[in-house]
Amino acid sequence: MSSHPISQSNSASVPLKFPRLASLFMAFAWAVIAGSVGLNALIKSNQQQSAVRKILPAGRL
């Protein structure tokens, strides 16, 4: 049995491998969701601005 600190920390962290991967996946999933919501809001805003610019006469905006 080795008293090397690295080998002990590796054996202690092995049981936490699945929770670590699960939390990493959840963080990635929430980042994708937040990014898509932000991109959708940006697209909708640009569409609304284009619609308003088409309605208003030239030189009003």
Image (cartoon, grey):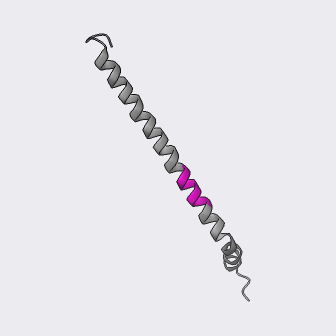
Of 59 and 53, the residue lying toward us: 53
Say whether residue 41 is left or right of residue 58.
Answer: right
- Residue located at (74% from left, 89% from top): 1
Seen in the picture, residue 41 relative to 18 is either above or below; the reply is above
Residue 36 position in % (x across, y down): 46, 44
Residue 57 position in % (x across, y down): 27, 11
Prevalent SS, magenta region: helix
**Residue 16 quadrant:** bottom right
Seen in the picture, residue 36 relative to 42 is either above or below; the reply is below
Seen in the picture, residue 60 relative to 40 is either above or below; the reply is above
- Residue located at (36% from left, 29% from top): 47
- 16 magenta-colored: no
- Residue located at (67% from left, 80% from top): 7
The span picked out in magenta is 23-30
Spot the residue most to the bottom: 1
**Residue 44 quadrant:** top left
Of 16 and 29, the residue lying toward us: 29
Say whether residue 16 is left or right of residue 29.
Answer: right
Spot the residue most to the left: 58
